[in-house]
Amino acid sequence: MHFLGKLHWSVIFQDLGIPIGLLVGFIKFVDMLVNLESADLVGSATAKLILAPIYGGCIALIGYFWASGSSNDFNDSMQKTAISWWVPASSITSFLIILLLTLRETALVTYFFEPLPFSILIVVAAMALKSSKSNRIVALTNSLLFGAMLNTAVQVVFYFDANDNPDDLGYFVGCSCLALSYGLICYVCIYLSSYKFAQSEKINASRVTWHWLEISGFLIFMFLAPETMKANFANIRDNDAHNALESRVQELEKKLNIKDLTQNK
């Protein structure tokens, strides 16, 4: 978009730095879940998941401060209707090729599609397009946010309903990360294509980015917090069982000692 559509790079950095950082973080985390060999790796993978959007935020800050320090209004420097379809199409194609190569490198191509989160996102987006008569770009962008939030809520319900099976727990966390990845991929493509439409279709990228951060934060704190209430109760239950077993062992030892003393007499 910078070279073909004359859109200044600072605008792209500012609007897409954090969403792409979140996307990279979720893809890397799903890759860790697929190839998980030890539970000890979850902590480092969570740190990398949080670190990726921080890098994206740094890129967004560079774009923001560069645009703020310039006398030109880069957001209005390009007439949207003046560019051809092939400009955003080329940018979207390049983005998808890089994404596919990343998935291939991490061996996630076969694991990247999950029917339930993908179906929920498609249904919500279709309902938004059908109900909106104008500003469909904005409506579709908002529907991606709602679909990602709904997907995360559904997976949270499944997660807490699971019977502490590590495979099931990892699957639900992975589905949530994939749901947000689907939404972020679609959002980047819609953002790039929006530069072909009229000014009424302009996306409020700062607001949308903030909402993506909120949903991602919800996912991280619900699934990857150091300890949840469920974990606390599970630890209490395990401690009670351990204490009961220890008391039983002590009683048996006392009975054996009494029996030995009786036999010796």
Image (cartoon, helix red, strand yellow):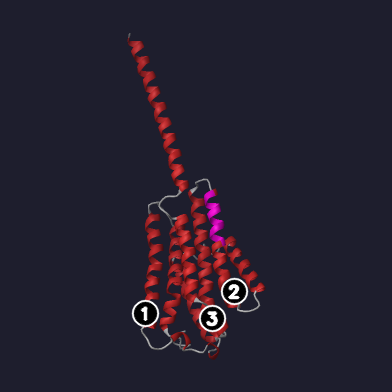
User: How packed is label 1: few (under 14 Cα within 10 Å), some, or many (20 or more)?
Assistant: few
Left or right: where does residue 45 sit relative to residue 147?
left
Residue at mark 2: 139
Q: Main secondary structure of the magenta part?
A: helix
Q: Position of residue 122 (x, y in %)?
A: 61, 68
Asked which secondary structure carries label 2, the reply is helix
Query: Can the viewer see residue 100 in this picture?
Result: no
The image shows residue 222 at horizontal and vertical percentages of 47, 55
Report the amino acid beneath label 2.
Ala
Crowd band around label 3 with a 10 angstrom C-alpha radius: few (<14), some (14–19), many (20+)? some
Query: Mark 3 belongs to which amino acid?
Result: Lys
Q: Quadrant of the C terminus?
A: top left
Picture residue at 54% right of the left edge, 77% below the top: 190
Q: Residue at x 49, y 73 (%)?
A: 207
- The residue indicated by pointer 3 is 202
Q: Secondary structure at mark 1?
A: helix
User: Could you say whether the residue bearing mark 3 is in a helix, strand or loop?
Assistant: loop
Q: Are marks 2 and 1 in contact (CB under 8 Å)?
A: no
CB within 8 Å, label 2 to label 3: no
- Label 1 belongs to which residue? 65
Magenta segment, which residues? 150-160
Callout 2: few (<14), some (14-19), or many (20+) C-alpha neighbours within 10 Å? Answer: many
Q: Amino acid at mark 1?
A: Phe
Q: Residue at x 48, y 60 (%)?
A: 218
Say above or below: 160 vs 80: above
Seen from the viewer's position, the closer of residues 71 and 259 is 71
Q: Please indicate whether residue 211 sits to the left or right of residue 143 in the image.
A: left
Sequence-wise first label, 2 or 1? 1
User: Of label 1 and label 3, which has the lower sequence position?
Assistant: 1
Q: CA distance from mark 2 to mark 3?
A: 11 Å
| Residues at marks 2 and 1, CA–CA distance in whole angstroms | 29 Å
What residue occupies the far top of the structure in this picture? 265
